[in-house]
Image (cartoon, rainbow, N blue to C red):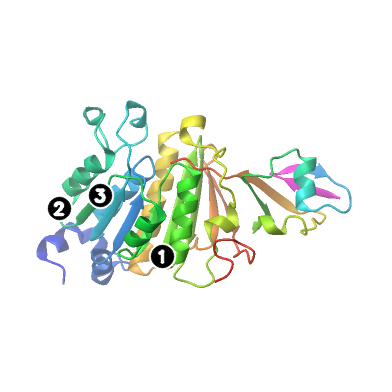
């Protein structure tokens, strides 16, 4: 299955949820936010949210500066 | 009623169909708490003062440092070492003597913040750390006060609007359920002045729209600003039913 993460193409196994994606990407779980197709997916849903072919994933960090 | 002096001062608002005299009176009746008087809070406070928001409460406990001046454009080199809220209160009163400004020059705990929230219509989170952001969010959810959150580092900005007077509002914790202080801030990552100023300025714009009853396009949304490309990305934030802050309302 092909998806994009921050506009970069990523090839995944057929079954992959968001938690598994972050492990594949070696991205920290804490302080991150994830959107799939412009919709934020809550942290509590990451383990259940199955990614689909052509999903556009946006991964970013909380920023606190001001 | 607006006075003759106010009619003159706000004449460019009165020409606007979207503001007019009614909107200007709403601004005059507006009470806004701005927490953090740095790169976000200083332009936000100056625009809201200039616009005639009748009551501003500004909170910060820092003293001005020379490294602030690269982006915190409300202050001058001669101000170094003075507490920011005292400086900013003077600045805002110089900009617009028609408004009331009160300053809070200490770190508030949640109870003090809840007391302050009883007296305002809107809060702008212009702080520089995750612990403050989480506490402000909890208090605004409890007090059902609308919250406009801005943040910036490097050449990136984030902007969110959670209207806690509405039952469908998501909250900051739905998006970032973390108390980790490993998050990025200006002192560990750097920031460009116009980037943080852009976000603070838009917080002021959204505040004016909220007070005058204009619809906001960013409620329950996260906007990401890229200062390199000038592109904005928009993400919808739904209330997380499992959120430990707002999930049970």
Say if residue B5 shows up in the picture.
yes
CA distance separating discs 1 and 3: 19 Å
How many numbered marks appear? 3
Q: B81 or B155: nearer the eye? A: B81
**Which residue shows up at 15% across the image and 53% down it?**
B97
Q: B116 or B58: nearer the eye? A: B116
Give the residue number, with chain letter if any, for mark 3. B103
CA distance separating discs 2 and 1: 27 Å
**In magenta stretch: residue A2:** yes
Give the residue number, with chain letter if any, for mark 2. B97
Question: Could you say whether the residue bearing mark 2 is in a helix, strand or loop?
Answer: loop
Q: Is residue B1 left or right of residue B183?
A: left
User: Which tag is nearer the camera, tag 2 or tag 1?
Assistant: 1
Give the residue number, with chain letter if any, for mark 1. B145
Q: Position of residue A17 (x, y in %)?
A: 79, 53
**Taking B127 as reference, is B239 above or below it?**
below
Asked if the residues shown at circle 1 and circle 3 are in contact, with their CB atoms under 8 angstroms apart, the answer is no
Which mark, residue A5? none
């Amino acid at each position: 299955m092909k998806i994009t993460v921050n506009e970069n193409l990523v090839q995944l196994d057929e079954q992959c949820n968001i938690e598994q994606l972050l492990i594949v990407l070696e991205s920290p779980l804490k302080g991150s936010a994830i959107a799939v197709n412009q919709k934020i997916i809550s942290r509590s849903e990451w383990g259940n949210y199955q990614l689909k072919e052509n999903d556009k994933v946006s991964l970013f960090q909380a920023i606190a500066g001001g | 009623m607006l006075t003759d002096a106010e009619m003159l001062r706000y004449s460019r608002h009165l020409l606007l169909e979207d503001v007019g005299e009614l909107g200007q009176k709403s601004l005059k009746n507006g009470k806004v708490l701005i927490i953090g008087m740095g790169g976000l809070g200083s332009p936000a406070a100056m625009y809201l003062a200039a616009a005639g928001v009748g009551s501003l409460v500004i909170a910060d406990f820092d003293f001005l440092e020379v490294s602030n001046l690269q982006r915190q454009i409300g202050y001058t080199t001669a101000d170094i070492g003075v507490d920011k809220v005292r400086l900013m209160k003077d600045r805002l009163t110089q900009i617009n003597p028609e408004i009331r400004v009160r300053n809070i020059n200490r770190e508030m705990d949640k109870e003090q913040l809840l007391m302050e929230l009883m007296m305002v219509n809107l809060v702008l989170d212009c702080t520089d750390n995750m612990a403050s952001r989480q506490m402000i969010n909890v208090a605004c959810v409890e007090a059902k006060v609308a919250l406009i959150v801005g943040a910036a580092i490097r050449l990136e900005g984030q902007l969110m609007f959670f209207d806690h007077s509405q039952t469908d509002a998501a909250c900051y914790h739905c998006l970032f359920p973390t108390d980790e202080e490993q998050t990025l801030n200006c002192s560990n990552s750097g920031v460009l002045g116009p980037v943080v100023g852009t976000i603070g300025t838009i917080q002021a714009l959204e505040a004016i729209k909220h007070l005058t009853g204009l619809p906001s396009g960013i409620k329950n949304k996260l906007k990401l600003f890229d200062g390199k490309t000038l592109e904005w990305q928009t993400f919808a934030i739904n209330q997380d039913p499992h959120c430990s802050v707002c999930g049970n309302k």
